[in-house]
Image (cartoon, helix red, strand yellow):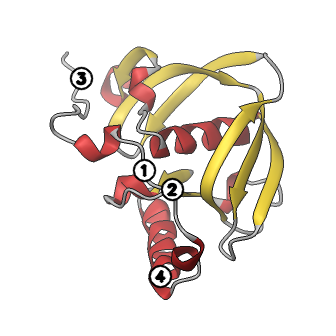
Amino acid sequence: MLLKVPKESEYPLLYKPSRELTMAEIKSDAIKKFTADLIETMYVKNGVGIASIQAAKPIQLCVIAKDFTPDKKTDLVLINPTFEKVSILRDWDEEGCLSVPKVYGKVRRYKKIKVTALNTEGEKIEFAAAGFFARICQHEIDHLNGTLFISKAKQLHTLEETAK
């Protein structure tokens, strides 16, 4: 079976790094509204995270669903985020993506990372992330840098193939 994955020629925005937001943009009503809409879209699509580029806005902003954050109380908004490995340990696990519906594959990611970003008020935040939370952070930050999980994945398959 031929997998349907987004090609760069069909979806060039997904494959280009997004630009950083300025402080004025971060504090603007337009970005606050966009962030709220992005969060709503993530939940409507049953995602655990979503990057702005997936909503055709090439800016450095992503969201992680509250159920997958350490405090499990609020959705996590990351603006201009970066991460660095805390350990060389990595592991393989299955990933999917809202941009590539019903396609899954094994991706090797760092088990522990340190994330640096700005919050919705433009304040610098830093935190350690481990396990599945670290995986989501890396996946979403990859989006902002123009990298889709399918470029790193092994054993790509569709949901239909898995059900057989």
For residue 3, the mark is 3
- The disc at residue 33 is 4
Q: Is residue 135 visible?
A: yes
Identify whether 158 is placed above or below 88: below
For marks 3 and 1, give the one nearer the viewer: 1
Q: Is residue 153 above or below residue 84?
A: above
**CB within 8 Å, label 3 to label 1:** no
Secondary structure, mark 4, is helix
* Structural distance between the alpha carbons of marks 3 and 1: 26 Å
Dot 1: within a 10 Å radius of its alpha carbon, few (fewer than 14), some, or many (20 or more) residues? many
Q: Amino acid at mark 2?
A: Gln
- The residue labelled by disc 2 is 60
Query: Along the line of sight, which residue is nearer the eye, 132 or 46?
Result: 132
Q: Where's residue 39, x and y in %?
A: 52, 68
Q: Secondary structure at mark 1?
A: loop
Instruction: Answer few, some or many: residues within 10 Å of disc 2's Cα (few below 14, many 20 plus, some between 14 and 19).
Output: many
Mark 1 and mark 4 lie on one chain; the one further toward the N terminus is 1
